[in-house]
Amino acid sequence: MTNFTTSTPDAQIDLRGTPCPINFVRTKLKLEQMAPGSLLEVWLDSGEPIEQVPDSLRMEGYPIEQIEDRSGFFALQVRRPPAQA
């Protein structure tokens, strides 16, 4: 999955070595602390984390903008949705 527009994340968290579902919980908490429309980059391990976290975020309504394989880990970019009117 590639995105041709490169967005600079507003924040970044390194969750390598963090087991499921703790990595999802920490990602969601971080997103909730950020301003609406902000972009968060999350570093996740291969295997269960990169398989589970993006799906869980999508189910919660968070749009996944990019998943990049960075040789040894994955960088997931997820945006906090704009505030609902």
Image (cartoon, helix red, strand yellow):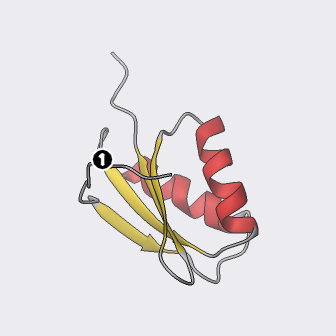
Residue 23, picture quadrant: bottom right
Q: Is residue 39 above or below residue 20?
A: above
Q: Residue at x 25, y 54 (%)?
A: 7
Residue 6 place in picture, x, y as percent: 26, 55
Q: Position of residue 83 (x, y in %)?
A: 34, 28
Q: Residue placed farthest to the top in the image?
A: 85
Q: Which residue is mark 1?
A: 38
When asked about the image quadrant of residue 13, the answer is bottom left
Residue 68 placement, left or right of 73: left
Give the residue type at disc 1.
Answer: Ser
Number of disc labels: 1
State which quadrant residue 17 falls in: bottom right
Query: Of helix, strand and loop, which one carries label 1?
Result: loop
The residue shown at (54%, 52%) is 28
| Residue drawn at (39%, 34%) of the image | 81
Question: Local crowd at mark 1 within 10 Å, few (<14), some, or many (≥20)?
Answer: some
**For the point 48% across and 39% down, which residue is it?**
63
**Could you tell me residue 47's position as x and y percent?**
74, 71
- In the image, taking residue 59 as reference, residue 9 lies left or right, namely left
